[in-house]
Amino acid sequence: MFSMFVMNPVFSVIALINAAAYSVYLSGRKSVRFGLLYLIPAMLMLIVINPAFNHQGATIAAYLPNGNPLTVESIIYGVMAALLIAQVIMWFSCFNKIMTADKFMYLFGKIIPHLSLMLSMSFRFIPRFKAQFNKVKEAQRCIGYDISVGGIVQRMKNAVRIFGVMISWSLESAVETADSMRSRGYGTMKRTSFARYGFEKRDGFILALTAVLSGYIVFGCAMGYADFRCFPTVKMTPVTALPITVYVCYFALCSMPMIINLQEDRKWKYLRSKI
């Protein structure tokens, strides 16, 4: 939430560094490849496109061929927007890696049972759909209907063929799931749930620490300690003692997942060494 709604260069750098480090920790080379092939080019494209269409700002750096001014403020705003989008994507990639369907059901199964069930089924359906799509694509390629071979019309026909197969598979899978749930008595009485997780003292400590840090950051933002604007001129709250405390709390909040995982890894290695 802070990454999405607080546009501040210090906040953005802190969040992006921690989100990138945690994403690499969770996904390894896959995260690095995603960043190099997709995320960085998208950021550069946004940085280039924004000044071409946004001409606000008081500091003119140059004039474009069509006569519109190229302002320093619009360039800075493009950089800030790119950093904001990148950190949000990174955080959601970490969320997608951590929050499995069983964890989601444990958290919200009793509060919103129907919605949590739908979301957990959706989370499970996405990797299944991807795996089935790869199978269908390979099968079609073996019989000469590859989407990368032939002219544009032929490729479109092959793609439509694969898409039709996937639609049929999705509908059939949905019917089978519904029949299975009905056969097992879903909806006939109050549902019980099984969870292999439990709320412990350390969970309460982390929850309280997160609430304290988040509360102080919200207080700091409300008091204007994290204010930053690009138009008409670039202006930022002076970095004094109180803003620094807000930045420190935000760094602690963003680095908390990585610290917890590293601590658990160290404990696990220590326990294994005692075997």
Image (cartoon, grey):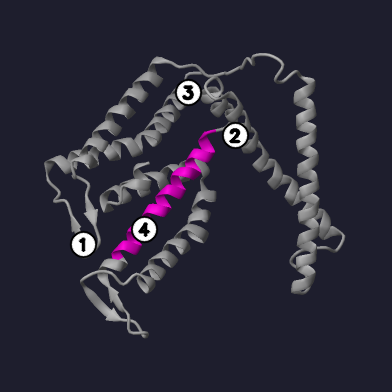
Task: State the residue position of label 2.
Answer: 119
| Residue under the point 27% across and 31% down | 215
Q: Dots 2 and 4: beta carbons under 8 Å?
A: no
- Mark closer to the chain start, 4 or 1: 4
Q: The residue under label 4 is which amino acid type? A: Ala
The label on residue 273 is 3
Give the magenta part as a residue range. 76-99
Task: State the residue position of label 1.
Answer: 234
In this view, the mark in front (3 or 4): 4
Query: Is 53 displayed left or right of 182 in the figure?
Result: left
The secondary structure making up most of the magenta span is helix
Q: Position of residue 11 (x, y in %)?
A: 29, 47
Note whether 135 is above or below 208 in the view shown: below
| Residue under the point 43% across and 42% down | 22
**Residue 90 lies in the magenta-colored region:** yes
Q: The residue under label 2 is which amino acid type? A: Leu
Task: State the residue position of label 4.
Answer: 81
| Residue under the point 31% across and 26% down | 209
Q: The residue under label 1 is which amino acid type? A: Val
